């Protein structure tokens, strides 16, 4: 984006070069023609609705998952604790990342509090790290359960200790985002005003390349490699004739295999959606590090980023629905929650009607009063 340091420097430039108002308009017109695609109002509205729905569904849906695991003791298995950790990180994505990055990218300005310029990218990076680590832990836990059913699995205390380590590592790896993202005041040539932008100011380009590669490996390549290997091994074992260590008869063996297949199917869908949703944005980010100038010449690059970022953020919405469709335990708990909400709404309506009946005078009483 073309810009001067501030409005004063632009005025000085205009005065020194005797630039007229008509010439300024010509410069602005040239600037607009050679800038990125200017979104029509209808496109902006569609993006706003799409991003808003992602935020709301991510927060509400994953909060239900957290409530189910927290309030139902029978749901507090190690796998479900990992799922709850994944849900919490998705809630953070919906609350802090999606709305702030959307307005900044669409409007090319930063309109919220300055400190959020550091908080939003930091929380986004931490949440993504935790999400993919949670998916990896779930895959490893399922792999151990299927391949080594007689071996001791993660205890709850061990699982909590592992998750604590995951959060600490995720926070540490995201610190550069909190350190190097800054607010800069820039003069916007398109409307001749000063504006704030939030962007990373890396110490060197080499540091930017190194950090981007590390993030790509941590958030995508290594975890998905481990997850893919785990589920391939699980699939191979599940389609074998028997489970090792099961001595209670063929019926119980078949029932356990059937239940395990359902769980693995559910988790594989979660992982496939995560990898599909994040691939465009991860590809965009790594390409931008090396070919930023070339990509910025593409007229519709802002639309490409908005679509890629929306797809990545939407990954936080799908998991609660997948659990509800493919996991009987979560499905039953969701039904209990919905019934409770409906019952509470019904009771509230009945109470309101009783209150109105009790305190609203009847028409007969009004007539009698008027006759007297």
Image (tube, grey):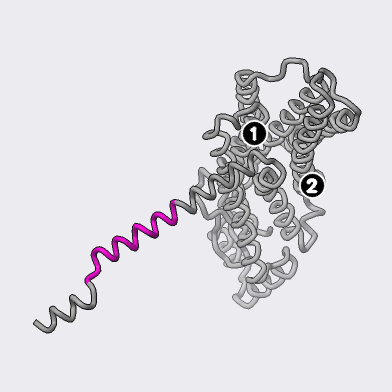
Q: Residue at x 72, y 66 (%)?
A: 37
Write down the quadrant of residue 286 in the picture: top right
Whether 348 is among the magenta residues is yes
Prevailing secondary structure class for the magenta stretch in the rendered image: helix
Write down the quadrant of residue 260 in the picture: top right
Q: Is there a contact, CB below 8 Å, between mark 2 and mark 1?
A: no
Q: Which mark is residue 174?
A: 1
Q: Residue at x 80, y 25 (%)?
A: 146
The answer to whether residue 64 is above or below residue 1 is: above
Instruction: Inspect this view and state whether residue 267 appears.
Output: yes
Q: Which mark is residue 276?
A: 2
Q: Is label 2 in a helix, a strand or a loop?
A: helix
- Residue 325 coordinates in the image, percent (x, y): 70, 47
Q: Is label 1 in a helix, a strand or a loop?
A: helix
* First along the sequence among labels 2 and 1: 1
Out of 53 and 287, give the one closest to the viewer.
53
Q: Residue at x 34, y 63 (%)?
A: 353
Q: Which mark is residue 187?
A: none
Rendered-image quadrant of the C terminus: bottom left
Instruction: Inspect this view and state whether residue 4 appears.
Output: no
Q: Residue at x 14, y 79 (%)?
A: 368
């Amino acid at each position: 984006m073309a810009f001067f340091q501030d409005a004063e420097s632009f005025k000085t430039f205009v005065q020194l070069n005797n630039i007229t108002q008509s010439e300024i308009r010509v410069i602005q017109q040239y600037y607009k023609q050679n800038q990125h695609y200017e979104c029509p109002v209808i496109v902006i509205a569609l993006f706003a609705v799409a991003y808003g729905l992602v935020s709301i569904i991510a927060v509400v849906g994953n909060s239900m998952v957290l409530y189910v695991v927290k309030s139902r003791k029978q749901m507090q298995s190690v796998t479900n604790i990992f799922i709850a950790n994944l849900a919490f990180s998705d809630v953070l994505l919906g609350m802090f990342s999606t709305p702030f990055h959307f307005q900044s990218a669409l409007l090319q300005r930063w309109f919220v509090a300055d400190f959020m310029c550091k908080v939003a990218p930091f929380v986004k990076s931490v949440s993504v790290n935790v999400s993919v680590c949670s998916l990896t832990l779930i895959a490893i836990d399922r792999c151990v359960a299927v391949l080594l059913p007689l071996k001791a699995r993660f205890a709850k205390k061990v699982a909590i200790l592992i998750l604590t380590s995951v959060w600490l590592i995720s926070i540490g790896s995201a610190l550069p985002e909190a350190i190097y993202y800054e607010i800069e005041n820039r003069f916007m040539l398109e409307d001749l005003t000063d504006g704030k932008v939030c962007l990373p100011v890396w110490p060197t380009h080499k540091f930017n390349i190194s950090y981007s590669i590390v993030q790509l490996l941590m958030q995508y390549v290594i975890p998905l490699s481990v997850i893919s290997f785990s589920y391939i091994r699980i699939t191979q074992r599940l389609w074998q004739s028997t489970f090792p260590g099961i001595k209670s008869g063929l019926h119980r063996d078949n029932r356990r295999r059937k239940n395990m297949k359902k769980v693995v199917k559910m988790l594989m869908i979660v992982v496939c959606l995560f990898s599909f949703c994040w691939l465009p944005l991860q590809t965009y980010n790594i390409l931008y590090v090396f070919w930023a100038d070339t990509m910025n010449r593409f007229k519709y690059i802002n639309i490409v980023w908005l679509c890629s970022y929306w797809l990545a953020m939407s990954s936080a919405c799908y998991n609660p629905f997948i659990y509800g469709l493919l996991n009987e335990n979560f499905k039953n708990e969701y039904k209990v929650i919905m019934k409770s909400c409906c019952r509470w709404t019904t009771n509230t309506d009945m109470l309101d009607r009783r209150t109105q009946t009790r305190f609203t005078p009847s028409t007969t009483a009004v007539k009698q009063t008027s006759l007297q």
